[in-house]
Amino acid sequence: MGHFDAFRSDPFFVDVDDFVNLIAADDLLEWAQVYGNYYGVPKNQVREALSEGKHVIIRVDVQGAKRISEIIPGALLIFIIPPSLDVLKKHLEDRGVDTEEEMTKRLAAATEEISQASLFDFTVTNEEGHLDDTVNSVVNIIESESQVIPPRDVSF
């Protein structure tokens, strides 16, 4: 596996009022409210990393990927999927999702997201027990796409 310079941001926390102000000021590249909590990606952090020639990897759901692709049409979108819904169900069970209603809800959401995989540039299957292979596949895609001429326009 090659090496590339990627931006990594540790999360920082703000109160809800400050977060709402960030949304209102359009200072977030992408944001969502999930299970009662707000999550977002500040635009200035991404711009700064890109200006330094770094790759920026943002982990988002399908809705977040759609938003990013609207703001940055040249963004590289990689969809990582489980090998099957059964494997996903086992992971959810291992994480403590134990009510049938919650399990059904999460599996339905996953099925809906998987059905939208064509919105992405690449799809990588995260085979059970082969995380290193999944990571290598993603890195290889990023490295390969970094060589495309003309380069992707990721300005915003």
Image (tube, rainbow, N blue to C red):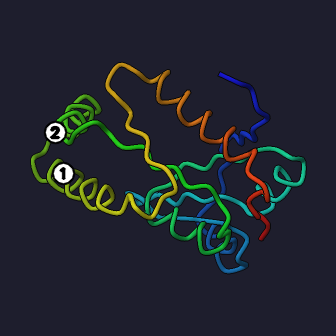
Crowding at mark 2 (Cα within 10 Å: few <14, some 14-19, many 20+): few
Q: Say which element carries label 2.
A: loop
Q: Residue placed at 81% from the left, 61% from the top?
A: 44
Q: Residue placed at 69% from the left, 40% from the top?
A: 10
- Front position in the image: 14 or 99: 99
Q: Check the image and name the residue furthest to the right.
A: 52
Location of mark 2 (residue): 98
Q: Residue placed at 55% from the left, 55% from the top?
A: 77
- Front position in the image: 44 or 57: 57
Residue 62 in percent (x, y) is at 43, 61
Q: Quadrant of residue 18?
A: bottom right
Q: Say which element carries label 1.
A: helix
Q: Which mark is residue 102?
A: 1
- Residue 4 placement, left or right of 73: right
- Residue 65 placement, left or right of 118: right
- Residue 138 placement, left or right of 110: right
Residue 70 in percent (x, y) is at 60, 75
Q: Check the image and name the residue furthest to the front.
A: 149
- Residue 107 placement, left or right of 53: left
